[in-house]
Amino acid sequence: MKIAAVQINVTPGDITKNVEKLTRYIDEASNSGNDLVIFPEMSDVGYDMPIIVKTASSWDDEGSPVRILQQKALRRNINIVAGVSERVKEDVYNALVVINRQGRIVSKYRKTHLITAEPMLEHHHLKAGDKLVTCKIDDVEVGLMTCYDIRFPEVARSLSISGAKLLLVPAAFPLVRLPHWTALNIARAIENQ
């Protein structure tokens, strides 16, 4: 499986601009022969709690970022994993959507470990997910995690025991903690062989 991991600056609250950027990278990934393109945490709305709560959309809404990604996956014959917001009635989740080559949502993961530290305080703004998720992308079983989840070795281990051969961890991890990010990812890989 050939994977394009996209690292981008997301403009907080400018969904149109962000989605246009995502679709350009999908085109580029597809043109380069990738099977899967992965986008960071909150790539639709940006990582800013008040903005996330204000601008999060239902995935069922016509014209929502997820619907646009579904259409693009189908047109470009590529799998997509994207960190996006998800509104369900009054609740907002920090979620990952997995879209297959046929444009169908094959899985989603709602971040289970919300940050309780300043200045993020995700737990004051977002609802936590309540289950760990693995799914197949093409013929590969993958485990899904988001950002802060990487600090909890039990998550990676549980996904691995459930059959995941690859762990995907889209993030908006702060640059100041880059040494932590590097060490944690290496540790999770070593622990799970």
Image (tube, rainbow, N blue to C red):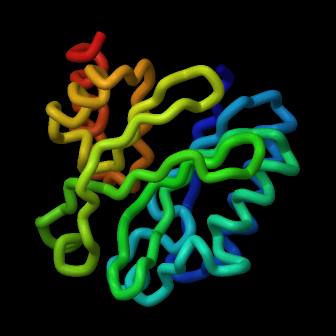
The furthest residue to the left: 117
Please tell me whether residue 13 is drawn above or below residue 127 in the rendered image: below
**Quadrant of the rendered structure where residue 68 is?**
bottom right
**Quadrant of the rendered structure where residue 19 is?**
bottom right
The furthest residue to the top: 193
Please tell me whether residue 162 is drawn above or below residue 25 in the rendered image: above
Question: How many discs appear?
Answer: 0
Please tell me whether residue 187 is drawn above or below residue 17 in the rendered image: above
In the picture, which quadrant includes the C terminus?
A: top left
In the picture, which quadrant includes the N terminus?
A: top right
Give the residue at x 39% y 33%: 143
Q: Is residue 47 left or right of residue 11?
A: left
Camera-side residue of 116 and 11:
116
Residue 169, x across and y down, in percent: 40, 40
Give the residue at x 40% y 85%: 89
Q: Is residue 193 left or right of residue 165?
A: left
Camera-side residue of 151 and 133:
133
Give the residue at x 36% y 69%: 93
Residue 172, x across and y down, in percent: 39, 55
Give the residue at x 53% y 54%: 97
Please tell me whether residue 168 is drawn above or below residue 90 in the rendered image: above
Residue 43, x across and y down, in percent: 54, 62
